[in-house]
Image: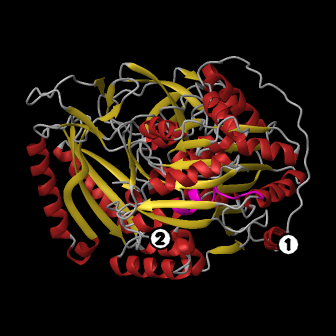
Amino acid sequence: MMYLKVAIPRPLDRLFDYEYSEDDHGVISLGDWVAVPFGRSRLVGCVVEIKHDKPTLPEGVKLKAVTEKISSDFSLPSELVQICKFGAEYYQYPIGEAFFSAMPPSPEKELGTRKVKSKEIKVKEINLNDEQRLVVNTVEEKLALGSNPVFLLEGITGSGKTEVYIELAKKRLSEGKSVLILVPEIALTAQLRDRFENSLGNPVALWHSALAEGLRQVQWKKIKTGEIKVVIGARSAVFAPMKNLGLIVVDEEHDQTYKQEERFRYQARDIAVYRAHLQKIPIILGSATPSLESIQRVKEGRYVHLRLNRRFSGQMLPEIKLISLSEEMLVINEKVKTPFAEKTVQIMQETIDRGEQVIVFLNRRGFSQFILCQDCGWIKECPQCSITLTHYQRKNELRCHVCGYHQHVPSDCEQCHSHELRGMGFGTESLEEELQLMLPDAKILRLDRDQITSQKRLEETLDDFRSGKSNILIGTQMLVKGHDFAKVTCVVVVSSDMLLKWPDFRASERALQTLTQVSGRAGRAELPGQVLIQGFDLDHTVIKVLQGEQSHESFIEEELLMRKELNYPPFSRFVRFRFQGKNESVLRKKVESIIERVLGESENDRSRMMGPSEALLFRANHEYRFDFYYKAPTIDALMKLSKKLKSMAEFEEIELIVDVDPYTS
């Protein structure tokens, strides 16, 4: 008889003991999945420890036995077991939930031997320019010396970072090793797969949540056995069971979507850095606008800084044109009331008249932001969250973007019964409708989460735009990263103020990253590009950096100085403790009592603590939320406070969610 400690996918901070008989179930190893009784349920967990001595149990407690060992085809490699244990400890999250993130698709059952359609791969040679060749040679020289540092590749948009990744991947494949490429958006995976396959001559597997379960299971096995050596995926791909991994690439390393916002709140970029360190392999972090955390690590000598300073095509960066919404006339008539200045619409018309294409960026979905009663000022809010419902005109629907609640648009005001209801604000759906009225000859597509409901729909939309079947593409964050459209010469940022005014210490950094990325979609081939930035606050530091009136280096130094003085990342480990409960007054009293005790015991650390305060979104899914922040000077200090607060919250019987390195409020 053997005794196992098993990680169960439940939000509980512990492992669970079970008996195991090798005579009944076969040889057991770390990383194997087993089916076990858990309360009245049967769950699948991962074996984290194996012992021959029976654990000491409380009096009257009988140890339960494993009911089934899952096929060894799905066992986690040893490095993934270690990564999950590290992630659970650092992100202060239940270990079973961490292992759940690495769990193969439905390991208890065979989902079918679905075959991936084979296709002819036409290998295309890549000719690197001098800058790219220098970067590749520098990496190879470092590796030849036996070191495996983290490389930060900073390259302006269109500078050919992808070609560098491909060249480095070729070298690793020639050595019999495998390659993992992380990208921030599912929308980028198909385009990048084609480029890698055509350059490497190897089949490439995609890895993201939109793939069918059966396909994911088949690919999981092939990746683990080494039959597939190149994987391109979104953040969850950091847990891919790569055999003989030789290189990790994190493209757009600055992007906030690498941070998981639900359940196990890991940062895929940082997990990737840990994985590279653990497996002693090189990792490339690529970006046109690196995160300040990565830049600071370069300053500290922990990362090697590589640069690409000119576009691969030889084209100049696009011209930045500012459109002041306080000075320019908006397009308003009996048919439309739009957020577009007349000058903006005129330039868009001239662009499509030349046979070129336009991208319109607005990071807000729906038709209008909310509906308002013109007579009494009533606004329809979500009954479950402290947020207004977004209006979708085509579906005649109001929808909550937090909990998913939806209803038909009411015919009259719920407060004064007036029929004078009007949609306020604007979103991508209304832009699509209004642009069609202003530019009747335009062929318009939309790219956002409401429109793109499957991988097939996504690829069709991108292919239609790339092939010229449409000449205007409207979208949210999905379209600003990494896409390469040869005929796009005009990019319109509908409202820069929405980016610049967000209440967050990263607001300026994030705004510059987003605006740089979306600007980089213009003029990537032979044709020159231009970027129209509409807004009211056009004297903002970020705008000056984009226009070249202030250097990017001075912007970084100012941001780093501010953060150092205020103890913000990268000069601290930032953590948010979110207390949740259904009764506001009870929750408030308990949270205030807990934090009062913590502050009383932490006199030397009080300047690094903020709160408690109502969360920016105070009520979500019928639960009230209070936030308490800590700018920890060390990881040990973070762990110490986290464990103390979790113990207090458990005693007070209130829910506590720990979010290390949070990116949203």
Position in image of residue 185 (x %, y %): 58, 45
Q: Residue at x 79, y 70 (%)?
A: 135
Q: Residue at x 58, y 21 (%)?
A: 108
Which region is colored magenta?
Answer: 515-526
Query: Exactly how many numbered labels are in the figure?
Result: 2
Q: Earlier in the sequence, mark 1 or mark 2?
A: 1
Position in image of residue 114 (x %, y %): 73, 20
Q: Is residue 525 magenta?
A: yes
Q: With respect to residue 441, does 26 lie above or below?
A: above
What residue did someone put label 2 on?
A: 543
Q: Residue at x 64, y 28 (%)?
A: 456
Which quadrant of the view contains residue 563? bottom left
Which quadrant of the view contains residue 561? bottom left
Badge 1: few (under 14), some or many (20 or more) residues near its Cα, within 10 Å?
Answer: few
Q: Amino acid at mark 1?
A: Asp
Q: Is residue 79 visible?
A: no
Position in image of residue 582 (x %, y %): 17, 37
What residue did someone put label 1 on?
A: 130
Query: How far apart, in angstroms, are the residues tagged by discs 1 and 2?
Result: 31 Å
